Image: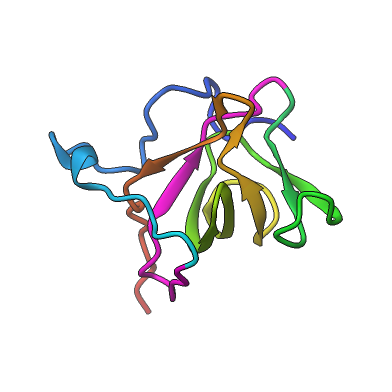
């Protein structure tokens, strides 16, 4: 997979850039489930050298690998279990839903971000 953004750490143009807004974001509660669009969002910042991060079908890290979630993709939290995130894809390339790790060793794979502003066409 090709990274969603040309440079993995450049600011996401779909996110609003209001000063101080990032400090208002809160990590999801462990074990809490969210209903769209209430779940906190994360941006994939890891896996740039491999085309993204591995997505699993289940919470268990030994479950079947689905594909990679592209670096720069934005996902919404469905459920958080420890360092594992059950997500739904908001923007970017990769499986529409799955489980990913927030960290690999000491490296962050996802970072909390604002919900993207997605334009909806008028009827």
| Viewer-proximal residue among 87 and 51 | 87
Q: Nearer the viewer, residue 116 or 55?
A: 55
Res 6 quadrant in image: top right
Range shown magenta: 32-49
Give x and y (percent) for residue 22. Answer: 24, 39
Q: Is 13 inside the magenta-drawn segment?
A: no
Residue 46 inside the magenta-drawn segment: yes
Q: Which residue is rendered at x = 66% and y = 55% of the image?
A: 99
Quarter of the figure that contains the N terminus:
top right
Q: Residue at the spot x=46%, y=59% of the render?
A: 30
Apparent side of residue 44 relative to residue 58 in the rendered image (left or right): left
Residue drawn 64% across the image and 26% down it: 105
Above/below status of 45 relative to 39? above
* Above-or-below relation of 33 to 68: below
* 104 with respect to 91 (left or right): right
Left or right: 118 in relation to 110: left
Identify the image's colour scheme: rainbow, by chain, secondary structure or one colour: rainbow
The chief SS type of the magenta part is: loop
The location of residue 50, given as percent across then percent down, is: 74, 25
The image quadrant where one finds the C terminus is: bottom left
Of residues 31 and 111, the one drawn nearer to the viewer in this rendering: 31
Q: Residue furthest left?
A: 19
- Residue 47: % across, % down: 66, 28
Image-based side of 65 in relation to 36, left or right: right
Question: Which residue is drawn at the image coordinates 57% and 24% (left, top)?
Answer: 106
């Amino acid at each position: 997979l090709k990274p969603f953004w040309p440079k993995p750490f450049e600011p996401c143009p779909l996110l609003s850039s209001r000063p101080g807004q990032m400090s208002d974001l809160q990590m999801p509660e462990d074990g809490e489930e969210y209903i769209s669009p209430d779940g906190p969002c994360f941006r994939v910042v890891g896996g740039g050298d491999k085309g993204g991060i591995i997505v699993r079908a289940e919470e268990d890290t030994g479950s079947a690998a689905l594909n990679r979630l592209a670096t720069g993709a934005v996902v919404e939290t469905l459920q958080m279990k420890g360092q594992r995130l059950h997500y739904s894809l908001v923007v970017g390339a990769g499986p529409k839903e799955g489980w990913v790790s927030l960290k690999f060793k000491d490296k962050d794979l996802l970072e909390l971000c604002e919900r993207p502003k997605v334009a909806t066409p008028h009827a």
